[in-house]
Image (cartoon, rainbow, N blue to C red):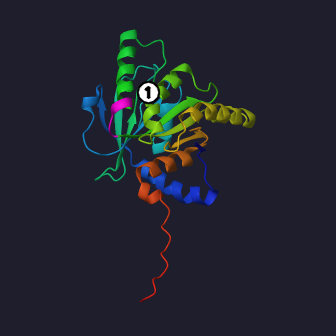
Amino acid sequence: MAESSRNAAAVSQDARTALAWAHNARFLTTASKLDQLPQGDLVEIAFVGRSNAGKSTAINALAQRRQLAFASKTPGRTQHINLFALGPKDEPDAYLADLPGYGYATVERNAKLRWQQVMADYLLIRRNLGGVVLLVDSRLGFTPLDRQLLEFVAPRVANGEVKLLVALTKADKLNRKEQQASLEGASTVLGELTTEAADVSMLLFSAPKRIGLDDMATTLYDWTHPAAAAPEPAAADPVSPT
């Protein structure tokens, strides 16, 4: 497991490319059931988190758009999977899936149970799912609901099928000592998912202060463009003629 960070020069160059890619995000469709999502092979990156963890704010910051992801005035009321296309406008290369927030008591029980099942099914069986960004309030750490969501996706993370990035949101509201404690707490939880095959990382995040934004954009770009992220192969030694 890694804390997502890069040297300043690499972040500056890679982040510009990644942020330009994310800036092209545009709404594609909304779905209340998995069979309403598009078919095909494009990888999906799912944003998940408690209803007040700052999920919509993070998506809007990533895309550098004010209202790409709609934040309901009543937390927990959004009950659809909203899908956004990423990459070139004429030929998208990935999708961003904004899953409903969870954890608010104001949502009617039957609706809450139905959406828990839809989200669980999405995380468990959606073939296109290639990465999950879990937003956790850095001031609270992992709640029981956050841990429950991790349990849904844990088998696919452990075998390397799905990558995981935990963004510890609202990090600007913590001092440095508190930020470090938040990272250490997350590391302990995520250590249970770590295997040789797993790709698990975490970062401190604040949309208003742009903390972690470059690293988040670059991580997601690398997930969906592995060839671009891979180092150049070493040149082979010349072969002497025989």
The number of callouts visible is 1
Residue 236 higher or lower than 95, as above or below = below
Residue 94: tell me if it is visible. Answer: yes
Dominant SS of magenta comes to loop
In this view of the protein, which residue sits in the foreground, 2 or 73? 2
- Whole-percent x, y for residue 111 in the image: 36, 14
**Residue at the location (29% across, 45% down)?**
41
> Mark 1 falls on what kind of element?
helix
Q: Residue furthest right?
A: 177
Q: Quadrant of the N terminus?
A: top right
Residue 84 higher or lower than 242, as above or below = above
Instruction: Magenta stretch: give its range.
Output: 124-128
Please indicate whether residue 187 sits to the left or right of residue 35 in the image. right
Please indicate whether residue 103 sits to the left or right of residue 182 in the image. left
Q: Is residue 127 magenta?
A: yes
In this view of the protein, which residue sits in the foreground, 100 or 152? 152
- Whole-percent x, y for residue 132 in the image: 45, 37
Please tell me in which quadrant of the rendered image residue 11 appears: bottom right
In this view of the protein, which residue sits in the foreground, 156 or 222? 156
- Mark 1 sits on what residue? 152
**Residue at the location (25% across, 30% down)?**
35
Q: Is residue 147 magenta?
A: no
- Whole-percent x, y for residue 186 in the image: 61, 32
Mark 1: which amino acid?
Phe
Please indicate whether residue 238 sits to the left or right of residue 25 in the image. right
**Residue at the location (54% across, 20% down)?**
144
- Whole-percent x, y for residue 79 in the image: 36, 22
